[in-house]
């Protein structure tokens, strides 16, 4: 069974592709309220429950921010 993509999937993918051009990228939303971006095997994680004004992804190779999706 396939699940629908989360509303922010395209937004996150667009920013991830811009940050990691040419990389193989997967985005995973987990049941424990995390979002993982994997770029060529390097995993970056954002905790959904945080009150940040941006998505802050943290991984062993560093961190990066993606602006929140505009829901208008």
Image (cartoon, rainbow, N blue to C red):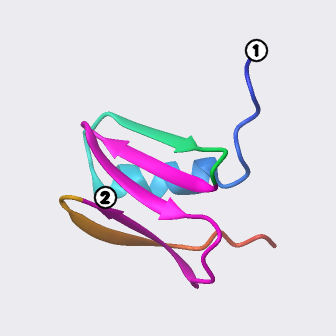
- Secondary structure at badge 1 equals loop
Between disc 2 and disc 1, whose residue precedes? Answer: 1
Q: Which residue is mark 2?
A: 19
Does 37 sit above or below residue 51? above
Give the residue drawn at x 24%, y 37%.
40
- Give the magenta-colored segment's residue range: 33-59
Q: Camera-side residue: 49 or 27?
A: 49
- Secondary structure at badge 2 equals helix
Q: Is residue 57 magenta?
A: yes
Give the residue drawn at x 66%, y 55%.
8
Disc ID at residue 33:
none
Give the residue drawn at x 63%, y 83%.
51
Residue 70 occupies which quadrant of the picture?
A: bottom right
**Secondary structure mostly seen in the magenta stretch:** strand
Where does the image place residue 22, in percent across and percent down from the top left?
25, 39
Residue 69 occupies which quadrant of the picture?
A: bottom right
Q: Is residue 45 magenta?
A: yes
Where does the image place residue 52, in percent across and percent down from the top left?
57, 83
Residue at the left extreme of this rendering: 61
Q: Camera-side residue: 20 or 45?
A: 45
Disc ID at residue 1:
1
| Real-space CA distance between mark 2 and mark 1, rounded to the nearest whole angstrom | 31 Å
Residue at the front extreme of this rendering: 32
Where does the image place residue 62, in percent across and percent down from the top left?
22, 66
Does 52 sit above or below residue 3? below
Q: Is residue 50 left or right of residue 22?
A: right
């Amino acid at each position: 069974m396939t699940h629908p993509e989360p509303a922010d999937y395209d937004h996150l993918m667009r920013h991830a592709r811009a940050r990691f051009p040419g990389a193989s990228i997967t985005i995973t939303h987990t049941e424990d309220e995390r979002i993982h971006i994997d770029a060529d095997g390097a995993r970056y994680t954002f905790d959904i429950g945080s009150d940040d004004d941006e998505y802050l992804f943290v991984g062993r190779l560093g961190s990066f921010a993606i602006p929140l999706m505009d829901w208008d």
